[in-house]
Image (cartoon, rainbow, N blue to C red):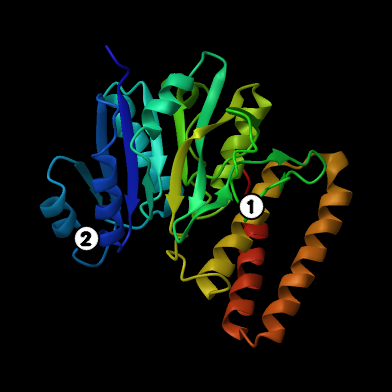
Amino acid sequence: MQPLVYVIILNWNHPDDTIACLKSLTTQTYANLRLLVVDNGSCDDSVTKIKSACPTAELIVRTDNGGFAKGMNTGIRHALKASADFIFLANNDTYLAADTIAQLVNTAQPNIGLIAPIIYYADDPQRVWSIGAMFNPWLLEPKENPRGMIDTGQWPLYLEQEFVPACGLLVPRFVWEQVGLFDERFFMYYEDLDFCLRLHKTGWRVIIMTQAKMWHKVSLSSGGFDSPNERYAMARSSVLYFRKHTRLWQWPLIGFWRMGSAAQTTWRLVRSGKWSALQAYWRGLWHGMREIPS
C-alpha cells in the first residue's frame, strides 16, 4: 500500500488562490493523498468558499491568525494524528505538475529528511524561483541561490542542498517527530531557515528532486515587498533567528554583517520615502531584541 501523504495548505483571506491550488492537487497521479486546509483566522468568506468549491478537502478553522508557523503546525499535528507517513507543505499561491507528489515520495530514503521540487515563477514557467541553497557557515544564511535562472536541464536529477523555503516541501513523519515542528515564535519569515538549520545540525539530508515541478505566484500575504507588515515581520524574525543560532565565535562577523544589512535597508526605505515601513522595520528589530530566547 502506498504511504499516506497529507498536503497542508494555509489560507488567510485568499480563498481564490487556495481553491486554485486545491484543484491543481486533485490532478496528482499519487493515489493515497489527503488535502487539508488550515484557515488562519480569515475575516472574509474564505471558509464558505473553500467548503463549497472543494468539499473533499479537510478544513481546520482557526479563530485567530497565529502566523505561518503556528498555522502550519496546526495542520501538521492533525496529519500526524491521522497517521500520515509524509506531509507536504504548499503555499496556497502555488500549483504542481501532476506527478510532483509521486516523484517526491519515490525519492524518499531513510536518511533523507526533506525532499522538494524545483519551484518556478508562475508568470515565467521556466524561470527558477527556488532550487534550494547551501548555508553559509559563517553567516547562517543561504548562499548560491540561482533565483531567476532559466531551467535548461542543467541540474542533476537529485541535487543535495541544505535549505529550501517552506513554499513546497515533503517531510517524512519520523523527521517531524525527531526534529520537531516549526518554531512558533517566528510569526512569518525565517521559520523555514530555522527548521532547515535544525535538520542540518542533526544530520538529515535535504534533496531537490529536479524532475518534480511546482509554480509559485509569489505571495503578497504580508502586503508586498517593503510594506510595513513585511518589513516588521522580516526584521523581528531575523533577530530571533540569529539570536537562536549564532554561537559566540560567530557574533563578530554576523553582528557586523547584520548592522550593514540594517543600514542598507534603512537607506533604501529613506530613498523611496517609505516612512511607515522604516518605522515598522526598526520596531521589528527592537521587538526581536527584547524577546526572551527559548
The quadrant of the picture occupied by the N terminus is top left
Q: How many marks?
A: 2
- Nearer mark to the viewer, of 2 and 1: 1
Camera-side residue of 178 and 161: 161
Residue under pointer 1: 149
In the rendered image, residue 67, in percent from the top left (x then y), is placed at 42, 54
Q: Residue at 63% across / 58% down in the picture?
A: 288
Q: Vertical placement of 49 versus 196: above or below?
A: below
Q: Residue at 32% across / 59% down in the picture?
A: 12
Dot 2: what SS? helix
- 1 relative to 255 in the view: left or right: left
Camera-side residue of 276 and 137: 137
Give yes or no for contact between labels 2 and 1 (Cβ–Cβ under 8 Å).
no
- 155 relative to 68 in the view: left or right: right
- Which numbered circle lies on residue 46? 2
- 172 relative to 241 in the view: left or right: left
Mark 2: amino acid: Ser
In the rendered image, residue 174, in percent from the top left (x then y), is placed at 46, 19
Q: Vertical placement of 277 versus 14: above or below?
A: below
